[in-house]
Image: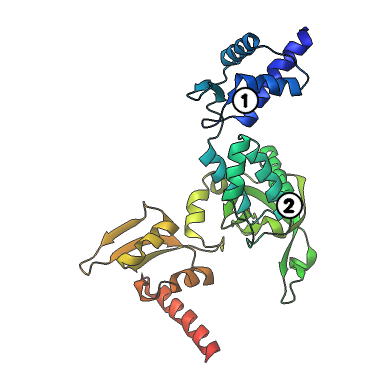
Amino acid sequence: MGAESQKLKLLYLMQMLYEETDEDHGLTTPAIIEGLLARGIDAERKSVYRDIETLRSFGMDIVKLPTRPVSYALASRTFSGPELMLLTDAVQSSRFLTRRMANRLAGGVASLGSRHQVRSIKKHVHVEGRIKMQNESVFHHVDTIHEALSRRRQVAFRYVKYDAAKRPVAQKDGQLYRETPVHLIYSEGCYYLIAYNEKHASFPTYRLDRMQGLRITDTPAVRNAAIATFDAEAYSARTFSMFGGDTRRVTLRVEEPVMGALIDRFGKDVESTVGDDGAARAYVTVAPSPVFFGWLAQFGRSMRIEAPRDLADEYVAYLHDILEDYA
């Protein structure tokens, strides 16, 4: 066998083990020889054994499976079968991806497993009925913002919202927004840019799928102590659906059946105490907004604002306004 054929033989053997075997499925020596022959490579048993040892020396975790006859398999790879299922499901359920993009990415993830694992993954994932954003520019926006952060430059874009007829309407009469990018956050199925607005010394948020004409400018990004000490994790914990604004320290009375929901929102380390009435008092920092009030309303009497009183009154007014509309 020529040197070129020997190189191809090793590569084809590696490909066969990668695509057709895993910890539960192997290839026997006759099957390997047959597979190589189908690729135009003649092989004998002893040469297959030598090649397997060469691939082991290269670092591939090739093991003998206790089958009759003995079969060989790639026992470990970058991701296990359950991990591939998890990654595929995460891709398929991402709202910011169009269905075409989700299917393409899921196919790429699946290719990291054997054909047997791919079959299981396809049976596992159900994508029909999932809401997808219809703006593929989000992918490019993420890349552009990462580049702007790396180059420490401001970005410019137009921002749109939707009217009652579902038509995009440019904000600020179509004028360009010019902002210093600070962080990208993925929240509730959408990507958001947290920016710094020098004029108002604030941190506005923008949904990436609502940006148009995003580009990097030649203007250096603003650099100050507020940006340097900005805590993105704390910001996303106290805001709801990236509805920003001034924050307040709030005491919530939380009954035991809804304590899990509080932890889901604020994390297990949320500051809390248990009162004499058996309910917890949770001390959280939030950005009061209709989104926060809507989140709170779903728990009815099981969770309520105890302090500050003016915020509780604002929540009551919010509920009364809704009731009046229905009345």
Q: Where 80 falls versus 225 (above or below)?
A: above
The quarter holding residue 120 reads top right
Q: Residue furthest front?
A: 68
Q: Which residue is nearer to you in this view: 90 or 255?
A: 90
Say which residue label 2 marks. 100
**Colouring:** rainbow
Residue visible at 65% across and 45% down in the picture: 106
Image coords of residue 206 (percent x, y): 65, 58
Image coords of residue 324 (percent x, y): 52, 89
Image coords of residue 103 (percent x, y): 69, 49
Residue visible at 51% across and 20% down in the picture: 64
Mark number, residue 61: none
Q: Earlier in the sequence, mark 2 or mark 1?
A: 1
**Kind of residue indicated by mark 1:** Leu
Decide if residue 34 is in sight here: yes
The quarter holding residue 121 reads top right
Q: Secondary structure at mark 2?
A: helix
Q: Which residue is nearer to you in this view: 138 or 42?
A: 42
Left or right position of 216 against 21:
right
How busy is the neighbourhood of tag 1: few (under 14 within 10 Å), some, or many (20 plus)?
A: many
How busy is the neighbourhood of tag 2: few (under 14 within 10 Å), some, or many (20 plus)?
A: few
The quarter holding residue 245 reads bottom right
Q: Which residue is nearer to you in this view: 178 or 43?
A: 43
Q: Residue furthest bottom?
A: 327
Left or right position of 175 against 17:
right
Say which residue label 1 marks. 17
Q: Quadrant of the N terminus?
A: top right
Q: Where 98 falls versus 315 (above or below)?
A: above
Decide if residue 194 is in sight here: no
Q: Residue furthest left?
A: 276
